[in-house]
Image (cartoon, rainbow, N blue to C red):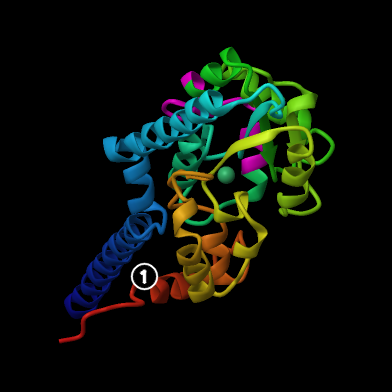
Amino acid sequence: MRKIVKIVVKTLALSMTLAAVTQALGQDSNSDRDNENNLMMAMAWKQTAAEYRALYHQGFNLARMRVELALAQQQDDSLPLAIISDVDETLLLANDYWGYLITQGQDFFDDASWDRWVAQNRAIASPGALDFLNFCVSNSVEIFYVTNRDQGETTVQLAIGNLNAVGFPSVDAAHMRVLRESSNKELVQQEIREDYEVVALLGDNLNDFARRYYSTDVDQRLNLMEEDRDLFGRDYILFPNPTDGHWIRAIFGESEPAPSNENREILKNAAKRAAWAP
Ligand SMILES: [Mg+2]
């Protein structure tokens, strides 16, 4: 009888230990998953680094110099001046959205929650954007907002709402171009150039400047960029974006890859493209 009791007690103890270990392992694996979120380093940088915000000031300072130069060179018969700017991660920052993804344990962009977030008008102006746009307007330089957003029929209304919420000037249908069917911005650029001298293009994605960068080949994108090296900081004002854009498309073959382990492996391989192996 005592032997049976001992066996029961040992079995119970073993079960409790196993349960505790299983629970602990479960907590650890959840914690590991959180700590291994693919967005972590990029978002910590975007949320905290003064360097990240300084790059926006640098970009808008360069853009302002370009506008000042164009104003000084204007002749009586010159076309009026304009700048063409992308919206997301160029004029508006969505750190609030990307931070939300991390709190949800998500490590890839999620289109459904993005559409819900856009409707909340929670985007903030990028550092220096408001001053630069107001400088343009006060000098009669037109601003054209060109975006590839797609929230269906409400896209324009939502984009105008976001831009108005941060107090940007010239926010109306006449200054807004929404490209829902294609991300090719060149046709819109050509149309604007018929009536304006475009001083600079502003964007966080090379595709904001020219369609030829729309490539899924990493090396080709790198080479094309090098061919155009003289345009950066002049015709092209580029802003930093380590979380999304066509550089992602070049790695995965699509701009919004699914949160699969296969894609996590692809990302890891991209991250160790060059890796010392002593
Ligand atoms: Mg953008």
Return the x and y of residue 6 as percentages of the image width and height.
18, 74
| Residue at position x 57%, y 59% in the image | 246
Residue 128 lies in the magenta-colored region? yes
Q: How many marks?
A: 1
Out of 8 and 23, give the one closest to the viewer.
23
Q: Is residue 88 above or below residue 110?
A: above
Q: Is residue 29 above or below residue 6?
A: above
Q: Is residue 173 above or below residue 36?
A: above
Figure quadrant of residue 77: top right
- Magenta residues span 114-131
| Residue at position x 64%, y 37% in the image | 198
| Residue at position x 21%, y 73% in the image | 10
Dividing the image into four quarters, tell me where ligand 1 lies: top right
**Residue at the extreme bottom of the image, as rendered:** 278
**Residue at the extreme top of the image, as rendered:** 138
Left/right of residue 102 with respect to residue 200 in the rendered view: left
Return the x and y of residue 215 as percentages of the image width and height.
61, 69
Amino acid type assigned to the residue bearing label 1 in the image: Ala
Judge whether residue 261 can be spotted in this image.
Answer: no
Mark 1 surroundings: few (<14), some (14-19) or many (≥20) residues within 10 A: few
Out of 118 and 22, give the one closest to the viewer.
118
Judge whether residue 20 can be spotted in this image.
Answer: yes
Residue 219 lies in the magenta-colored region? no
Quarter in which the C terminus is drawn: bottom left
**Residue at the extreme front of the image, as rendered:** 76
Quarter in which the N terminus is drawn: bottom left
| Residue at position x 37%, y 41% in the image | 46
**Residue at the extreme left of the image, as rendered:** 278
User: Mark 1 CB in 8 Å range of ligand 1?
Assistant: no
Q: Which residue is mark 1?
A: 271
Return the x and y of residue 65 as percentages of the image width and height.
44, 30
